[in-house]
C-alpha cells in the first residue's frame, strides 16, 4: 500500500487509511467475525476474536490485504513474516478514539514466536454456512 505512516493519531486518519485499504480490494466485504491464531502442533493460540457486532474493520481490512481475502468464509495460513506485515501495516494504537484489541493482542502473539512459527487467519462472513474446518469451528466456538 505504499508508505505506511508510523502511527495514526486521529479518528479521521484511521478511517481514511481503512478506506484506502478497502478501495484496493475490489469485492471486499467486512467479515461478521474473524481472528488470528498461532499454530503450534495441533494447538491454536488465539489473539482477540472479533465477535459478531464487535468487528473492528481496519484490522480486518489489513489482515485481508495481507491474506488476499475479499469475502466469504475462509481460512488462510500465514508465515511469521506475513503476520508481522499485518502488524506493521496497522499502527493505529496512537489513536485513542478507538479501542485496539487486535493490535494489543497481535503484538504479543507475534513477539512470542520463532522464525518458523505459523499462523492462521480465519474470516467468517456467514454464520448460516457450515464451518469450513476445525479452525473456523474454533473461532465460532469463541463467539458470544
Image (tube, grey):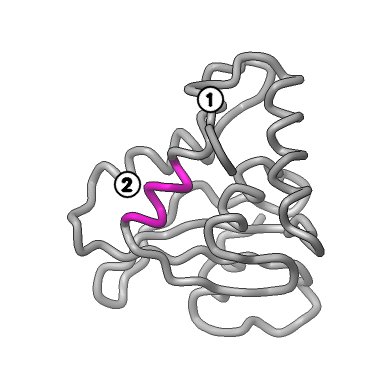
Residue 8 placement (x, y as % from top left): 59, 21
| In magenta stretch: residue 105 | no
Q: Which residue is mark 1?
A: 5
Residue at disc 2, secondary structure: helix
Label whose residue precedes the other's in the sequence (2 or 1)? 1
Residue position for label 2 = 110
Q: Which residue corresponds to the image point at 31% horizontal and 65% vertical from the top-left?
A: 118
State how far apart marks 2 and 1 are (Cα). 20 Å
Label 2 or label 1, whichever lies nearer to me, is: 1
Q: Residues within 10 Å of mark 2 (few under 14, many from 20)?
A: many
Work out whether residue 68 or residue 134 is closer to the camera in this orientation and state it.
68
Left-right relation of 29 to 2? right
Residue 4 appears left or right of 11: left
Q: Is residue 34 above or below residue 141?
A: above
Which of 104/1 is in front? 1
Instruction: Identify the magenta region.
Output: 81-87
Q: Is residue 40 left or right of residue 10?
A: left
Magenta residues, dominant SS class: helix
Image position of 32 (left or right of 99): right
The x, y position of residue 136, in whole percent, is: 56, 74
Residue 117, picture quadrant: bottom left
Point out residue 73 in the picture as x, y percentages from the top left corner: 68, 74
User: Residue at position x 49%, y 75% from top?
Assistant: 135
Position of 142 relative to 102 (above/below): below
Amino acid at each position: 500500500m505504499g508508505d505506511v505512516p508510523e502511527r495514526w493519531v486521529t479518528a479521521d486518519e484511521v478511517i481514511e487509511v481503512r478506506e484506502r485499504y478497502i478501495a484496493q480490494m475490489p469485492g471486499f466485504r467486512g467479515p461478521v467475525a474473524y481472528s488470528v491464531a498461532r499454530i503450534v502442533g495441533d494447538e491454536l493460540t488465539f489473539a482477540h476474536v472479533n465477535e459478531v457486532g464487535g468487528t473492528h474493520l481496519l484490522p480486518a481490512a489489513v489482515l485481508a490485504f495481507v491474506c488476499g481475502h475479499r469475502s466469504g468464509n475462509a481460512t488462510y495460513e500465514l508465515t511469521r513474516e506475513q503476520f508481522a506485515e499485518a502488524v506493521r501495516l496497522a499502527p493505529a494504537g496512537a489513536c485513542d478514539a478507538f479501542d485496539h484489541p487486535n493490535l494489543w493482542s497481535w503484538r504479543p502473539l507475534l513477539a512470542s514466536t520463532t522464525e518458523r512459527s505459523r499462523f492462521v487467519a480465519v474470516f467468517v462472513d456467514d454464520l448460516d454456512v457450515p464451518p469450513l474446518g476445525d479452525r473456523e469451528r474454533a473461532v465460532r466456538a469463541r463467539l458470544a
